[in-house]
Image (tube, rainbow, N blue to C red):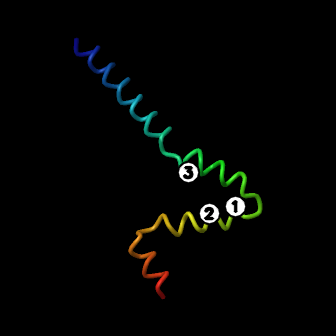
Amino acid sequence: MNLKYNKMKKVVCFCILILVLISCNKYSNGTKKALAEAGDNKQELEKVLNFYKEDSADNIIKILR
């Protein structure tokens, strides 16, 4: 009984790990598509995305300066 429990526990932990790794994308599919279509402007678009990824209060202060 204990061996079955340990094996099941390992399988569940492994499945959770795989799901977490799969879900950890930097960008959503729509954003990836927009970046692919941006062409030469991809770097500029990534700068904007990184700017707004930060805390919004910090962004407001940066804009007001």
Q: In which quarter of the image is the N terminus?
A: top left
The residue drawn where x is 50% and y is 38% is 22
Three-letter residue code for mark 2: Glu
Q: Position of residue 37 (x, y in %)?
A: 72, 53
Q: In this view, does 21 lie above or below 43?
A: above
Q: Are marks 2 and 3 in contact (CB under 8 Å)?
A: no
The residue drawn where x is 72% and y is 58% is 38
For disc 3, the marked residue is 27
Q: Nearer the viewer, residue 22 or 13?
A: 22
Secondary structure at badge 3 equals: loop
Q: Nearer the viewer, residue 50 or 6?
A: 50
- Could you tell me how far apart the alpha carbons at marks 3 and 1 are, in whole angstroms? 13 Å
Image check: 33 left or right of 19? right
Q: In this view, does 34 lie above or below 29?
A: below
Q: Where is residue 49 in the image (x, y as percent from the top left)?
A: 56, 63
The residue drawn where x is 42% and y is 35% is 17
The residue drawn where x is 49% and y is 81% is 63
Q: Are marks 1 and 2 in contact (CB under 8 Å)?
A: yes
- Could you tell me how far apart the alpha carbons at marks 2 and 3 are, in whole angstroms? 10 Å
Q: Name the N-terminal-most of marks 3 and 1.
A: 3
Q: In this view, does 49 lie above or below 57?
A: above
Secondary structure at badge 2 equals: helix
Using the rendered view, name the quadrant where residue 16 is placed: top left
For disc 1, the marked residue is 42
Image check: 44 left or right of 64? right
Using the rendered view, name the quadrant where residue 54 is placed: bottom left
Secondary structure at badge 1 equals: helix
Q: How packed is label 2: few (under 14 Cα within 10 Å), some, or many (20 or more)? A: some
Q: How packed is label 1: few (under 14 Cα within 10 Å), some, or many (20 or more)? A: some
Q: In this view, does 8 lie above or below 46?
A: above
